[in-house]
Each structure stands twice: as C-alpha cells, then as structure tokens.
Image (tube, rainbow, N blue to C red):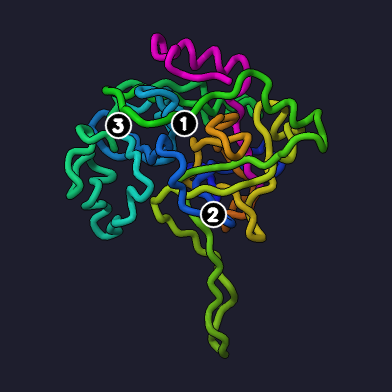
Amino acid sequence: MRRISLGIALAATMLVAVASPVSAITGNYTPDNEHPFVGLIAFYDKDGVFQHRCTGELLSPTVVLTAGHWTDNGTGGVNASARIWLLQDVGSHYDPATEHDPVTGYPDSCTGTMGNGIAEGWCAESHEMYNYGFDNFAGFPNIHDVGIVILDRAVDLPEYASLASAGTVASLATARGTQDKTMRVSGYGLSYRLITPPKGPNAGGSHNFTISYRVRLQANMIFTNIRGANAAGFSFAANGNGAGRGGTCNGDSGGPVFWPATSNRVVAVVSWGVLNAGCRGIGYYYRTDRAPVLEWIESVTGDAWSDIVVN
C-alpha cells in the first residue's frame, strides 16, 4: 500500500528523529471504493495559485476534516481557497507535462471531460477554512494538526465520516489484549516501490522510488502506543509501513484513521512520520477524539455541527 506522509519536509531538533508530514498509503493496499466521503483536496493562495494537496474527509455535506498543516498558509493564517474531488480515481489521468488531469480538471478546476463537478456532486469548492493552531510543529508534541474546510455548497452523499467521542483511543492503551487494535487509513498520497537495476558490472544498487497515483487507496495498520515523547497522548503511533504492512506516506496527511477498521468512525487524522524515506518510517496520527479538539471543531462549524455524528 501507499503510506501516508506529510507534504512538508522538516528537521525538528526536539524530535528523536527526522519528522516530516505524511503523504501516502503503503503496504498491502487496495483501491478504496468504500469511503465516498474521502477526497483529494487542493489549496490555493489569494491569486488562485495551487499550493499543495492532501486528503480530507466530509463529516457532513459542508464540513471537511483534514490536517492543520494543510489549511495553514505558513504565515500565521489560512489558505484563501480549496477544492475537493470526491472520486476514487480523481488523478488517474494526470499528465506530468501539463500538470493537469483533463478528465476531472485536477488541480485547476472542477470541470473536465466528465463535466461540471460542482453541479454533479463529485467536486466542491471552499473559501472558508480554519486551522486548530498548527504552526510548523510549534509546541511539539501537541502540534494542533487539525484543519476544517467549509464548502461553499453542500455535497449530498449516501454516507459521511463520523467523529469518535472523547477518549475513544485511550481505551486501546489500557485494555491490552481485549480489543482489536486494527485501524484503517485512506488517502491519495505516495506509494512506495523498490526497483532493483539489472545485474552487471555497471549496475547500481537497489533504489527507493515513490509514486503518486492520485487515486484513493486504503490499508489496515495496527495501533501501537499513545505514550512516549513523540505522542504524549496528543497523537498515537502505528506499526504501519515496511515489510508489506499497511501505512501512510506523503499526501495521505489529513486523511482519516478509522477505528474499528470496518467503521466510518474517525479517531485521528494522518499527521507526520519519523524517518519516512521510502515510505517505511513510523507514522504518527493526531487524535481528533480529544475533548479540546471536538470542542474546537464544534466552535468553527457553527450550525453545521448538528449534522456531524459523534459516537
């Protein structure tokens, strides 16, 4: 599968290793046709210039949950606008030469050969978003890596993601051996493959390659801990990535972590990784099941909060 990792490289002296934003699903991944509310989201500055893209999930017809480091504009504010495509294969026809997908319009518009995505419900735009307080990993390990995007118009889907109630993940750290710790991640990030050049006198060694399919993939991973200097209860770690295990990499950040794995209940967003070269490092996931985070989401979503399920 592809691993999820953050799209921003970072060297943080307060970390025990190099940390970077997460971007893609890795390991034993499969196409994700089960979560129609998970989309590829792109952000733009005030001039409409594309800044970056990641993963986001609809909590209601107008509310998208993602990572704070994506809504953040790097200067103390938020990006001017965003656009989300709710298609499993949104970028499968992306042309690296033109940097455009003619079928969906990604990353330039909601129109392409498929037609007007806004009118047809598979694409939506936003000019309102919020950052929980992410500021280049300040305050680590409580990096406040949650963002909310409010869509300009509602997107009607058969189902949406729900939010886990406060303290849900904490039970995994105390009820050892009595609960299934399998979680599921979904996203549009990079995937990893190992290519070994042909043998010969001039052949080099094996090289790591990451590939961006720009399609929604999913994989299972196993929760490992919520403690330690890097997590400290604000995030948790999982054993994903490497040796065929499911995990996350660049571009998956902001995507949902579901627990139980077969549910639509989000307990965290994909946030950052340690030593993520080759999409094989340890992934950390910022918890959305903490009371302060839930209270913040309620405060910025206003009347739309009544449409969001917390369970």
Mark 3: secondary structure? loop
- Against 211, residue 149 (above or below) is above
| Left-right relation of 230 to 196 | right
Q: Label 1, on which residue?
A: 66
> Residue 114 lies in magenta, yes or no?
no
CA gap, disc 2 and disc 3: 33 Å
Label 1 vs label 2, nearer the camera = 2
Q: Residue at x 43, y 37 (%)?
A: 38
Q: Residue at x 61, y 28 (%)?
A: 287
Q: Which residues are magenta?
A: 282-311
Which kind of residue does numbered mark 3 sit on?
A: Asp
- Against 251, residue 231 (above or below) is above
Q: Position of residue 34 (x, y in %)?
A: 46, 43
- Quadrant (top left/top right/bottom left/bottom right) for the N terminus: bottom right
Q: Position of residue 191 (x, y in %)?
A: 50, 56
CA gap, disc 1 and disc 2: 21 Å
Mark 1: secondary structure? strand
Which kind of residue does numbered mark 2 sit on?
A: Tyr
Q: Position of residue 214 (x, y in %)?
A: 39, 51
- Quadrant (top left/top right/bottom left/bottom right) for the C terminus: top right
Q: Label 3, on which residue?
A: 45
Mark 2: secondary structure? loop
Disc marking residue 29: 2
Which kind of residue does numbered mark 1 sit on?
A: Thr
Q: How crowded is the residue under tag 2: few (<14 C-alpha within 10 Å), some, or many (20+)?
A: many
